[in-house]
Image (spheres, rainbow, N blue to C red):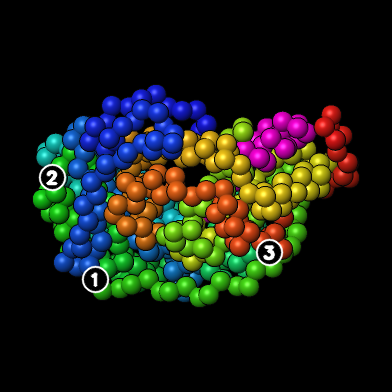
Amino acid sequence: MNDHTPPPLNLPSRLLSAQGLTLDEPTAIDLEVQSWQTSAGTQVRFVEARGLPMVDLILRFRAGSVQDTRHSGVAALTLYNLDEGSAGLSGHEHAERLERLGAVVDKRVRLDYAQLSLRCLSAPQILEPAVALFSDLVARPDFPVQALERVKGQLLAAQASRSAQAPNRVIGEAYRYLFDGHPYGHPQGSSTEGIAATDTEHLRVFHRMAYAASNLEVVLVGDLSQAHAQAITEQFSLALPQRWTAAQLPPLPVPRAGRVHIEQSGASNTVALALPITVPANAPEYLGLVLACVVLGSGPESRIMQTLRQRHGLTYDVRARLLPLQGGGLFVVQWEVASDQVAASSALVRETLETFIHQGPSDTELRYARQQIAGLLVRNIAQNARLAELLAELGHLGQPDDYLNTYLPRLATINARQVRELSQSNLDLNQCVLVSVGPSVAQIPLTPTSDQ
């Protein structure tokens, strides 16, 4: 999170007040989220935003890599082949028509979901053909054989590139270790063998199931009426395959502590301390863990940053994150450090966590954490594209329509004692895994600081 308070924003339709982003007098958010279900069972959230002549449309299917059927790679290959030809148009023709309209399409696949988004002007002569093209892309893909082989190569190259990046690799290894034997234990989502074995018929079968209207959540934010939004979402819903729901995931494995090192050349090590979280993101107590995470590792005043950088000069960047999933999630502290200081920095991080879990945060730390959270939230709802992404994530995690309007007041009611108790019951360092990626070298002790 950015630790700088943003300038006042003129957003009367979404904020009752954007002045003084502190939770002593919480910023009042007045966001009208309208929701409904289409006749085919698609869940929709809509925010009418007339300030800009733009529309942001997000489709989020429960069609992530954990839903892979026969081969590990089907989910990713299905998504990335959708725009290779649809409704009789070639991929090039389809892209050219969208480009002429100034429409931007984006795709991403994660463990829990596959997402497609459309951003375009709201003028009817632009929006209507763009939505029609986008609908064809999602609902009527041709899956040409020659395109599949090209996309396979692109996917393998992208995975190889990500795997070579230590920050990605260290998180992937944490998932692999803590979720061993579970679908979450394959964070890359696609194996080389699974990609090679996938053919166009596998894509068609997966698309008929996972891209069903009943397996979809839609978010619309922009310059259009609710009636127009309902017409668009009904059009999408009816064009898609029908009546399929994502499979429920198996229970998470029993947590186990461990140490993993991945040898990789370089000038430093990237390190992560990760532990599983069982509290779902839509549970009331989750907000206490959000505050704990910000106090511990968000910004220059955070506990771990003060310890590693300000006191010991070991790193330029360290951060703590909560990574929510459909089932559980992870709490992760990640940093980069000189290779001969992996052991020393890891001991300091663990010691800082132990102290926090035992003592909890100070009132000053909580106040600063709330200011950071409030500032980030205001920035997100001020931009349509970010708001649409936020609503898609909240819907995916089962949050209610009024979640954003009540978020800051609920956060303000959580005190230091509650954060301490929640940390003690949910952050168990006996279940953590420490992962490092980089060269193995002899470790050296810390140089004593003036306060030691």
Q: Which stretch did the figure color magenta?
A: 302-323
What element does badge 1 sit on? Answer: loop
Q: Which residue is mark 2?
A: 225
Residue 11 is tagged as none
Vertical comparison of 240 with 336: above or below: below
What distance separates the C-alpha of mark 1 from that of mark 2? Answer: 27 Å
- Residue 213, by quadrant, is bottom left
Q: Nearer the viewer, mark 1 or mark 2?
A: 2
Going by the numbered disc 1, the residue's amino acid type is Gln
Between 155 and 310, the one lying in front of the other is 310
> Can the viewer see residue 148?
no
User: How many other residues sit within 10 Å of disc 3, few (<14), some (14-19) or many (≥20)?
Assistant: some
Report the side of 248 relative to 319 (left or right). Answer: left
Let me know if residue 306 is in the magenta part. Answer: yes
Dots 3, 1 in contact, CB < 8 A:
no
Residue 431 is tagged as 3
Q: Earlier in the sequence, mark 1 or mark 2?
A: 2
Quadrant showing the C terminus: top right
At which x and y percent is residue 100?
Answer: 22, 35
> Can the viewer see residue 257?
yes
At which x and y percent is residue 356?
Answer: 67, 49
Vertical comparison of 28 with 145: above or below: above
At which x and y percent is residue 261?
Answer: 75, 55
Q: Nearer the viewer, mark 3 or mark 1?
A: 3
Q: Which residue is mark 1?
A: 242
Q: Residue at x 50, y 28 (%)?
A: 4
